[in-house]
Amino acid sequence: MKSTFDAIVSWFIPEEIHTQWNLFRRARIIVLFGLISQLFFTFTGLKWLRMDQGDRFLNVILTQLFILLITFSFRFTKSMALTGNLLLATLFVYFNIYIYLTGGINSSAMPWLLMFPIVTIIMVEPRMIAAWLVILLVDFFLLRSWTLSGEVGDVLALSAEEMVTFRA
């Protein structure tokens, strides 16, 4: 018998996928990411709100909303490729806005972009890696160019006291 949580996760997955174990496993990862990320984005959004960082707060809340809508739409689109790529694109925009606002190429969030090839394999399919690698390469050069020209925001520097006060 399925737990309530398993039943909720299964509801988001199109019925056609339930009988195909490998696809069901990947679909479950997509849905779990979409649901569990809501907690992360809620706490992160509250942190930015407490720090009076309106632009970062808006970035988090819009990302959270898009991820929730994409997760709900999976049941109706029935496309793992579309859902996975939309989730990746949403995260890509989120991280790029965050990186742009926090120092560009010097941002501590830059390493997060390294997750895209790995997540592509898990959420979408291996043949999409080439497309995401090209996107990341172009993105790196854009971020580098914007950083060198001074168009990006400042690196967020917090004192030790502020780090304790504002941690989520």
Image (tube, rainbow, N blue to C red):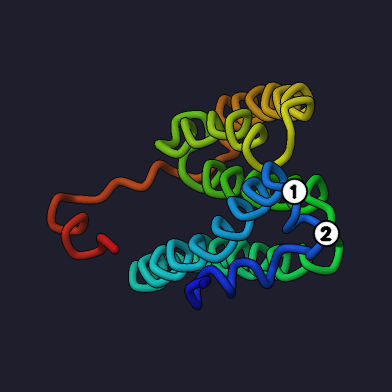
User: Dot 1: what SS?
Assistant: loop
Determine whether, in the image, residue 51 is placed left or right of residue 118.
Answer: left
Give the residue drawn at x 65%, y 44%: 92
Residue at left offset 67%, top offset 35%: 120
Q: CA distance from mark 2 to mark 1?
A: 8 Å
Is 154 or 136 nearer to us in this picture?
136
Residue drawn at x 62%, y 48% is 25
Q: Position of residue 163 (x, y in %)?
A: 21, 55
Residue drawn at (58%, 66%), measured in percent from left and top? 64
Callout 2 touching callout 1 (CB < 8 Å): yes
Point out residue 35 in the picture as x, y percentages from the top left corner. 55, 66
Front residue of this view, candidates 26 and 127: 26
On residue 20, the disc is 1
Q: Which residue is mark 2?
A: 16
The amino acid on which the numbered mark 1 sits, given as a three-letter code, is Gln
- The answer to whether 35 appears left or right of 142 in the picture is left
